[in-house]
Image (cartoon, helix red, strand yellow):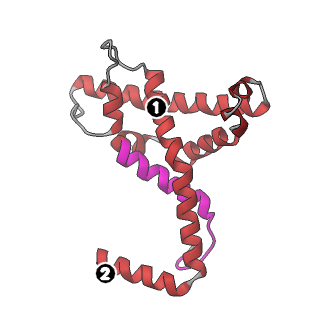
Amino acid sequence: WKGNSGEINLLAEMSALIINTACQCLFGDDLRKQLNPDRFADLLAQMEASLIPAAVFVPALGYIPFPAAHERNLARNELIDMLSKIVENRQEREEKGDVDTHASDLLNGLMNARYSDGSHMTLHEVCGMIIAAMFAGQHTSTVTSSWTLMLLMCNPDYLKRVMQEQRDVLG
């Protein structure tokens, strides 16, 4: 992409944008600044590719050692390793007083959540919740955004109207 023209992989670019946006909104600067959004998106895509829709009705299918299940486990393990470092870093910074422990992001909420018996979530559980939160919305938002932009590019009159609205609202 150079100047006002060129080609991009719209789906890949929107995926990275959605991940960056979600990370900032849900988890503050910690995830966004320390996370490689392209790799994170790739790992989420690997997990999605391994899903077996019929397992919703026949849960035992999820335990059959298909090659895709192995790929899913590798992707999830890499995500857990990646996120564990970020969560541990936040915990260390909180212990030193370098982080506002009353910050209202989801990461802080997960790290400080307590079960009814008073125990905290484990690091593995916190990372699993982050993956679930990102997995739940990333695909839908990426596809919706990509289709919207593609349709706008195919309909110049609507694109002009959208661009004008942005100028009017954002200045």
Badge 2 is on which residue?
168
- Element class at badge 2: helix
Decide: few, some or many residues near mark 1? Use Cα within 10 Å; few <14, some 14-19, many ≥20: some
Answer left or right for 30 relative to 85: left
Residue 87, image x, y percentages: 40, 29
Image: magenta residue range: 3-26
In this picture, is 116 found above or below 108? Answer: above
Quadrant of the drawing holding the C terminus: bottom left
In this picture, is 1 found above or below 81? Answer: below
- Element class at badge 1: helix
Badge 1 is on which residue?
129
Tally of numbered tags: 2
Please say whether residue 36 is visible from this viewpoint: no
Residue at 23%, 24% (x, y): give it: 96
In this picture, is 113 found above or below 150? Answer: above
Quadrant of the drawing holding the N terminus: bottom right
Residue 59, image x, y percentages: 68, 27
Query: What residue type is disc 2 on?
Result: Asp
Decide: few, some or many residues near mark 2? Use Cα within 10 Å; few <14, some 14-19, many ≥20: few
Magenta run includes residue 62: no
Residue at 34%, 18% (x, y): give it: 115
Query: What residue type is disc 1 on?
Result: Met
**Disc 2/disc 1 C-alpha distance (Å):** 39 Å
Answer left or right for 23 relative to 43: left
Residue at 39%, 20% (x, y): give it: 121
Using the image as rendered, state which of residue 18 and residue 2 is in the foreground: 18
Q: In the picture, residue 119 is in which quadrant?
A: top left
